[in-house]
Image (tube, rainbow, N blue to C red):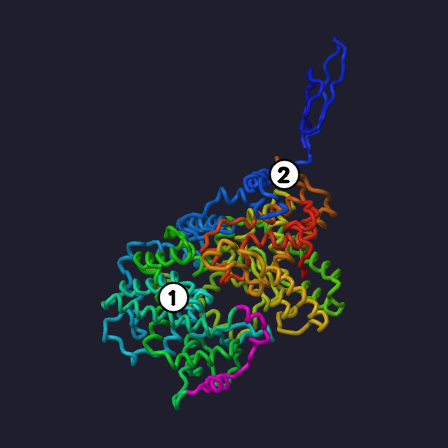
Amino acid sequence: MRNLLIYLGFLSLQVISGHFIPHIPMADDEAMPWYIVKEDTSVCQTTGCVEAAEALKVSIDSAADPCNDFYAYACGGWQKRNPIPKTESQWNQFNIVDRKLDLQLKDIFEDDLHLEQEPEPVALVKQFFQACMDIERREQYGVRPLSEILSTLGGWPIATTEGQWSEDKFDLLKTLGFVTRRLGLTPLATVFVYTDRKNSSRSVVTVDQGSLVLPRAMLAQPSMYKKQLTAYAEWMVGTAKLLGARVDEDEMMEEAKKIVHFESRLAELTAPSEDRRDAYRMYNSLSVRQLQKWTDTIQTHGKKSILQWDRLLSLVFQDTEANISSGERMLVREMEYLLKLEALLQNTSRRTLANYILWRVVKSVGRDTSAPMRHLSFSFDKVFSGIVEDQPLWIECVTRSTSALPFAAGYQFVRKFFDSEAKITALEMVHHIRQSFIDRVDTLEWMDDETKLAAREKAEAMAEFIGFPDWFSNATALKHYYEGAIVGKDHFENVMALTSVQVKRVFDKLREATDRNDWLTGPAVVNAYYNPLTNAITFPAGILQAPFFGKDTLEALNYGSIGVIIGHEITHGFDDMGRQNDKDGNLVQWWTPETEYAYLEKALCIVEQYDHFRVPELDVLLATKATINGVTTQGENIADNGGMEQAFQAYQQFVKENGPEQKLPGLDYTPEQIFFLGFASVWCESSSPESLLHEVLSNPHAPHRHRVNGPLANSHHFAKTWQCKTGSPMNPVNKCQVW
């Protein structure tokens, strides 16, 4: 630090940089002396610290009591200054970084000055974006490309003139095969290739219950959600009219209601997420022949079952080299669902089946056609999500382009915007926090030595992928990855073609050994995840930036933000679902009975605690005292609590090794308090009632307020740091902690 020369004038006492300098008497003829005083080194003055301090100042609501509601204290100011944009149903720190990322990608996609010098896939993603933005060409084609697809599948009954649709032209299995391999859709049953949970070195054909458009809870309780379901039916009618329907609108509405009713019946058949947390229950190994016998147990009145698995699988894998025989070993996740599905299909008209499946096609790619189709989608979202304005087309095209060619988009993003030092620093932090987890395991009184050893081995074996894949330095590897990808001037055709390429890439893994270095997402995303089948954590480049990460700010902030996220993902390997896999990702029982029982008791404490967390904003909408679902969110809640504790312990170790950190300028908080403020500020959010409803109905995460207050209320470190009295809301007597 530079020295400051301080001239002592006639003041008897002067304050400089927080230090008191006494007046020294001097003779009249004595020259006035100069004193050298060092600048205060207890405050960090880097650009990163100054910016972080300013961000916290405007985020904090000092009128709130941190020991009563820390989320309100840390985020109250942020919420006042960050109303929900008209195009969003919620607005949080992740959305802000997402928007920054969108602008960066837009900048990349619009730069066509260096096309000849860039790898071919980069040129392809730019061409994809430009075709998406070509409004004139898209309007010229309108809905015609979609209509042609529907025609090849026998026509969408609701959009067909009365008497022109024939059930003889509708082939259910052929249609299911087409929508799976061409669009990745799973409207009745999911057929895909997935890692074998008991032998993670290979992949296997996996069959599961189908997906739904609306949340299961919403479809299963139609009387409670009439407004949303009516808007859903109106969306169908509107699209049918644009696709050329010449039927009376009242008749179309009746037909749309039948589609909604059918999807509600499907929802009733599906297992809720609460019942899908036991990997052993969902691991059923059968051959195709055995699955057919199981399906045939449903009474068919002498007719063949509608679900003929041999044929369906051959249609799904039609574009691959895999030959699926009747002896092919498969994994079936929901045995009872398939029986119920067969019974439902037998008692549903072919017209309704065609209407529903082809509606899923229309819903999937309708926005990729004309402006009127996009407007109909937006009209539904106004009711469903609470948005006021539709997204600008450029944002939608950035999203579509990045989804279609994620590694091509990520390749250029990393080269142009990513700080390579962040990868090194983040990797070091991963190692520190993983060691913190291991150290915590060693101190657990409820875990016996045998299970502790297995837990340590799993944590030590956990692979980490930071920033971007190692092969990104090789442009030839990028070109090889997208070999066969074609992009033209027509946006709709581009979407269809590249979706098929992505689906085929997944199906082609059937006869290949598991690539444990495989990235599931591209680098240009603001997310992080744990893969239990490879025991690996991934932190893409998109999340390694402010406010989650900074290289010239306090480590207290980094450990409180990205550090907690790292700890969160590590803990996923040991939450109620991740703990079922061993260090190699295999479904193996590595817990002793006594330790497993102790674990379940501690997990139950988390479940019951979060079950009582209120969401009063939804009381009127749900006509009850709304609370979180502690069962469906338990995995994320366990990870939230464990991640925060591990990150704080790792930060304490950092201070022990490097000495205490400075304060932030203009803020009278200790670095430990800054850790918790950094943690909380990452989750600041403004939410609409519609957004909160979707979180409560179907999101595995708790609402952001409880992602902050829940872990902090369970933390003795937090209570001590903020001096919260025992029994206060943020320091309850009864606490829950697993890891």
Q: Is residue 525 left or right of residue 239?
A: right
Q: Is residue 391 left or right of residue 538?
A: left
Q: Can see residue 464?
A: no
Residue 345 vs 243, above or below: the answer is below
Secondary structure under badge 1? helix
* Residue 496 picture quarter: bottom left
Rendered location of residue 696, percent (x, y): 51, 60
Residue 551 vs 30, above or below: the answer is below
Secondary structure under badge 2? loop
- The Cα atoms of the two marked residues, 2 and 1, are separated by 52 Å
Q: How many other residues sit within 10 Å of disc 1, few (<14), some (14-19) or many (≥20)? A: some
| Residue range (magenta) | 273-299
Query: Is residue 280 inside the magenta stretch?
Result: yes
Q: How many other residues sit within 10 Å of disc 2, few (<14), some (14-19) or many (≥20)? A: many
Residue 220 vs residue 545, the one in the foreground: 220
Q: Which residue is mark 2?
A: 664
Residue type at mark 2: give it.
Answer: Leu
The reply to whether discs 2 and 1 touch (Cβ–Cβ < 8 Å) is no
Which residue is found at the position 33% from the left and 65% from the top? 236
* Residue 381 picture quarter: bottom left
Residue reaching furthest bottom?
A: 302
Residue type at mark 1: give it.
Answer: Ala
Q: Earlier in the sequence, mark 2 or mark 1?
A: 1
Rendered location of residue 270, percent (x, y): 48, 73
Residue 74 vs residue 367, the one in the foreground: 74
Q: Which residue is mark 1?
A: 497
Tag count: 2
Residue 521 vs 251, above or below: the answer is above
Rendered location of residue 721, percent (x, y): 69, 46
Which residue is found at the position 67% from the left and 59% from the top? 737
Which residue is found at the position 47% from the left and 61% from the top? 479
Rendered location of residue 655, percent (x, y): 72, 46
